[in-house]
Amino acid sequence: MNKEERMNVARQLHRSGCNCCQAVVMAYADRLPIDPENAKKVAAPFGRGLAGCREVCGCVSGMAMVCGLTGHNDDVRPLIERFRESHSDIVCGRLLQMGKKPCPEMVAEAAGLLSEVIEN
């Protein structure tokens, strides 16, 4: 899949009920060394800022999970910094207060950022 396809899949997954972390992770289910159902279960508690605590954004957690599962550990921090640059923060509660972009769009952006690392 190309970048736009990954972004659309992530956006659609979020709109159909996956939390932010699950949507980002599941957009890369075909690239992960675990089955999609287990990937979805592992990502579940990281949505809504870690179990609904509004801490680190689920999109950021999802990017880190995909990187870890695909052997791109060195790319996690640069991805986080790019996300922070784009949104001014990585904390769910503050991102929601700023309201610059709705969650489905942040999910899509995170999937797009990952594509630049995973697909190359």
Image (cartoon, rainbow, N blue to C red):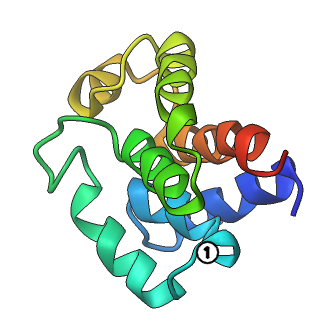
Q: Is residue 25 above or below residue 113?
A: below
Quadrant of the rendered structure where residue 114 is? top right
**Residue 27 place in picture, x, y as percent:** 63, 65
Instruction: Place residue 110 in its image quadrant.
Output: top right
Residue at point 46%, 17% (across, down): 84
Q: Residue at x 32, y 79 (%)?
A: 41
Other-residue count near label 1 (Cα within 10 Å), few / some / many at <14 / 14–19 / ≥20: some
- For the residue pair 91 and 82, the one nearer the viewer reads as 82
Q: Residue furthest right?
A: 2
Q: Which residue is mark 1?
A: 29
User: Label 1 amino acid?
Assistant: Ala
Image coordinates of residue 99 in percent, x first then y, are 40, 24
Callout 1 secondary element: helix
**Residue 118 horizontal side relative to residue 67, left or right:** right
The mark total stands at 1
- Is 64 left, or right, of 46 in this rendering? right
Query: How far across and how far down the image is residue 53, in percent?
Result: 10, 44
> x, y (%) of residue 106?
54, 38
From the image, which quarter does the N terminus lie in?
bottom right
Residue at (47% x, 26% y) in the render: 77
Quarter of the image with the C terminus is top right
- Which residue occupies 41% across, 77% down? 40
